[in-house]
Image (spheres, rainbow, N blue to C red):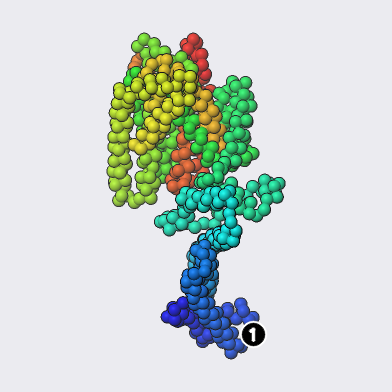
Amino acid sequence: MKATGFISLWTLVSLPCGQLANPAEHEDVVKHAIKLHRGKGVVITQRKQWVLESCRKLSGLLRQKNVVLNKLKNAIRAVEKDAGLSDEEKLFQVHTFEIFQKELNESENSVFQAIHGLQRALQGDYKDVVNMKESSRQRLEALREAAIKEEMEYVELLAAEKHQVEALKNMQHQNKSLSMLDEILEDVRKAADRLEEEIEEHAFDDNKSVRGVNFEAVLRVEEDEANSKRNASKREVEDDLGLSMLIDSQNNQYILTKPRDSTIPRADHHFIKDIVTIGMLSLPCGWLCTTIGLPTMFGYIICGVLLGPSGLNSIKSIVQVETLGEFGVFFTLFLVGLEFSPERLRKVWKISLQGPCYMTVLMIAFGLLWGHLLQIRPTQSVFISTCLSLSSTPLVSRFLAGSARGDKEGDIDYSSVLLGMLVMQDVQLGLFIAVMPTLIQAGVSTYSSIFKEILRILILIGQILFSLAAVFLLCLVIKTYLIGPYYRKLHAESKGNKEILILGITAFIFLMLTITELLDVSMELGCFLAGALISSQGHMVTEEIMSCIEPIRDFLAIIFFASIGLHVFPTFVIYELTVLLFLTLSVVIMKFVLAVLVLSLILPKTSQYIKWIVSAGLAQVSEFSFVLGSRARRAGIISREVYLLILSVTTLSLLLAPALWRAAIMKCVPRPERRSST
């Protein structure tokens, strides 16, 4: 260290020491220091002597550290000039000296941080909670930075150890002749080292200085049972850290997504066990529901309840299970579109467009009215009303699976109207997700900026409408020029091999959902449109593709409905059963009445009888309210209590949906058409 740097350093140390040595001005501070280090009853001269001795010792340590640093610099120069050392030996020795230099500097910084921390604490007010909180936050930040520096130093020591091993190997190779096999293995070792250096991503170093990145303390939980059975050494445990779990201070749990060493294949055993457990338990649960006359999907939901946080709590990878379940929604909507030809869509497009829009507007109006009476914020009322206005597309699709859908003369098929309205609601879902950030800002904005927020919402609506126009124009181009040749090529290549056909159809589904996602429209709409485009190729094509995709859809749908059960909390429902039943019945009846009213206005007179069936299919709350509710809760739009109420009302409405659907079918559909509608 240079002399000027040492003088400035000594000045910083002498400042607090000199302040403590003046009892006339800082009598309270001196008393506190004496109590900590000497006890009560010490005379003033002894206090001054203790302070001076402490400062003298600190000054001596800093001078000694300065001398050691100079010696280390001279040693590094000597090593670099030593021609008798190999490059590996020079690198190892220089690396070791640099690590020791860094250790001395970090120790010196820790001393000054402790001095300034003590000075700040002594000058603070112990009754001021805000000041103590700020001091605690600063200490926590200092500890985090210290932990990061210590981790980096440990990594450097591992690198130094590796350099030492390299130097020893080179010395051994120089002292003996290598066989041909040893030379080959040595070349392979060097190539492997180069490969690891090339594929290794320095994600920690690259992201630690990025804006918005925070250092946090986490717990690393190992697989204790497996390690204890194998009696693994500490080194073996360190090599197996990729399968451990991290838990932060907010009780969020994390798993490995990408290992440092990408050459070793790894698997998430927690996720594998979760999928296996869900698959095994879904069979008896679905079997039981079939026996008592309920749809099998409720058995899958019960399976999720039993395995979820409110049951056995055996599902560890909840986010991963929910992510895989989303693919069940994608394939379900694809098969819905596969049975929903563009000709049928063209026949009911006006009803499909007008019906959901009118219902959503009426739900929001009623929500604002009740919110005004109950003194609920408008943003919260709008959000809750919009959530409750959506209906479950996967649920209704299962109701309609295999049902008779032939149109009568002059009549409109109820399944076409119902699916068209549900698809439009999926579009509204994408619109609402896009508008949600503006809704969050509107909740905290002043009245002077409400006009700007309304203008932003209108601009967003215009963007969504433009995106929808672009999507449908693209679908027209694909239907006219691309989908026919594409399917014929797949069919020709897949003779005797269904893999190509399944892969080609799946790729087309993912392409369409990617396009709609890029255009800020819901991915679910893209899956539906993919099915509708393929269905335009004829009935034979539809039957062939459906036979290939249905088994995949069925398995993924099991995961999806089980993931819904993970968010069902029976204890909360039991505690608030009366309130929840009242709210659920109110929502179901309100949605049913509003749907009947809207459909009475927009349906032709010859098809008025289907309004009861369509209204029954819409009189439940979509499972996507779970997603919207979680986002709104994180954003502060709704409270924890409102979020739990939305989850519970959604679950109960889904449970009531089969009974309401069956009653509507029994009342309005002639007996020959009831084959599988229930």
x, y percentage for residue 609? Answer: 41, 16
**Above or below for 648 versus 225:** above
**Residue at the (52%, 29%) spot, across then down:** 557
Nearer the observer, 172 or 214: 172
In this view, the residue farthest toward the bottom is: 45
x, y percentage for residue 488? Answer: 38, 20
**Residue at the (37%, 18%) spot, across then down:** 537
**Above or below for 344 versus 112:** above
x, y percentage for residue 38? Answer: 63, 81
Nearer the observer, 231 or 355: 231
**Above or below for 107 versus 358:** below
**Residue at the (44%, 43%) spot, across then down:** 632
**Residue at the (57%, 39%) spot, across then down:** 271
Tell me the kind of residue under disc 1.
Gly
The kind of secondary structure element at disc 1 is loop
Q: Which residue is mark 1?
A: 41
Instruction: Quadrant for residue 628, please give it.
Output: top left
